[in-house]
Image: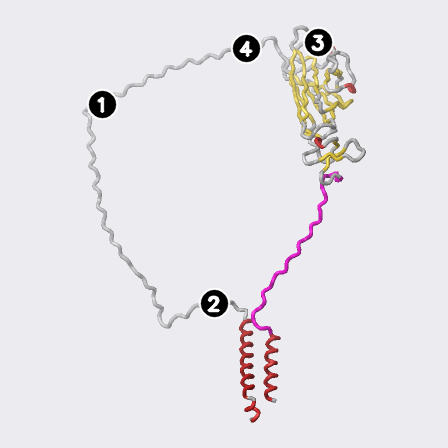
Amino acid sequence: METLKKNWAFLVIGAVSLLLGVLALLTALRLRDQGPVAPTAPGEQEALEGSPVPACQLTFTITLPSPTPTPSGTPSPTPTPPPGSSPSPTPTPSPTPTPTATPAPSATPVGGPTPDLVVEKSVDRTTANVNDELTYTVRLRNNGTGTAYDAYFDEDLSVYTSYVAPSMSCTKYTSSNGQTVNVGFEIDTLEDGVDTTPDAESSIVDRFRVAGDLTEDNNTWDLAFNDYITCTYKVRVKDNVSNGTQIKNLIVGHTDDKNGDQTNETEQQESAETTVTVNTVCNATCTSSSQCESGQTCYIASGATTGNCRNPSCVTESDCTCGVSATPSPTPSVTPTVPKAGTAWPTLFMIIGGMALLIIGFAL
């Protein structure tokens, strides 16, 4: 008892510390509650004892004045005409018929059947690269009722192409029997003028004539109705042609209405044209960058005279596709976490342990 009296101040301090520790413990437990912060909605309340009170209802009566009826107009009496005074309708005169025009008789063609030459030309592609070969097809067809005699055609090659020799071949289709057979031909280069002496295919430069025979009296390319001559040959795109160049090629076909060389014969001419666009692709042969597509360059290796169209960013790649550099993957940033509210359990144990030691020390 004497000891308690001497140490009453310490006992009061210990009691206050114990009370503060209990409050801290209760606060920690309260802050660790994970329940919702917002108040919950009140639930349904029990009905009051007794009969439910009926809902209050209000009734309004609106009285509107009765509309005053508008008197309708008094109809006017329709006058009655006296008997026998009604006018008779005026008769409409009948229209006078228009005489039908007599059609004029069709003019009878003079001279009998006439030939009608149709010239067709095609190419096996519409775009090409430098040094590519193009195959041209020429067809001379008679669409008239009369025979077309002594057929031939003149070719004027583009300056962007050169003739590939030997490549010429010709056939004839006969509509009467439906057969197609190979036919002979002669070629005359026109750079030195027109003559009847055939030239070798290897001598062709730009302009030449093709016929069954260069001598008109000996030319057997005669076409009855719907017969046609078909010739195919090849040209090569020159290596100095720039990208985007259009290669236009024109031929002119000839026939006449009489067999052989006659003074009173009538000659017929028809033409046809083809167009090929030079589209230089990657790795195509070139001598300058103007021959390559836009965005490409002509890469010529050291000591070489010709090169290839390449991507300027990687001229050593033949497919114009540069290697893709590795891109580092982004490192995800650390997501911050919100610390939990309340006092940690180790802290509470330290507070309680310290208070216990303090009380034991005062007691001793």
Callouts 4 and 3 close, C-beta under 8 Å: no
Residue hosting label 3: 260
Which residue is the extreme one toward the top? 263
Based on the displayed image, in which of its 4 quarters is residue 187 positioned? top right
Where disc 4 sits, the SS reads loop
Q: Nearer the viewer, mark 4 or mark 2?
A: 2
Where disc 2 sits, the SS reads loop
Where disc 1 sits, the SS reads loop
Question: Residue 324 in magenta?
Answer: yes
- Label 1: how many Cα within 10 Å (few below 14, some 14–19, many 20+): few
Which residue shows up at 78% across the image and 22% down it?
A: 165
Residue hosting label 2: 40
Mark 4 or mark 2, earlier in chain? 2
Mark 1 or mark 3, earlier in chain? 1
Residue hosting label 1: 86
Q: In the image, what residue type sits under mark 1?
A: Ser
Query: What's the CA distance linking mark 4 and mark 1?
Result: 63 Å
- Label 4: how many Cα within 10 Å (few below 14, some 14–19, many 20+): few
In the rendered image, residue 331, in percent from the top left (x then y), is placed at: 66, 56
- Disc ID at residue 177: none
Mark 4 or mark 1, earlier in chain? 1
Residue 110 in view in this figure: yes
On screen, residue 1 versus residue 131, left or right, reads left
On screen, residue 348 versus residue 285, left or right, reads left
Q: Magenta segment range?
A: 316-344
Pick the front one: 282 or 150 = 282
Where disc 3 sits, the SS reads loop
Question: Residue 282 in magenta?
Answer: no
- Label 2: how many Cα within 10 Å (few below 14, some 14–19, many 20+): few
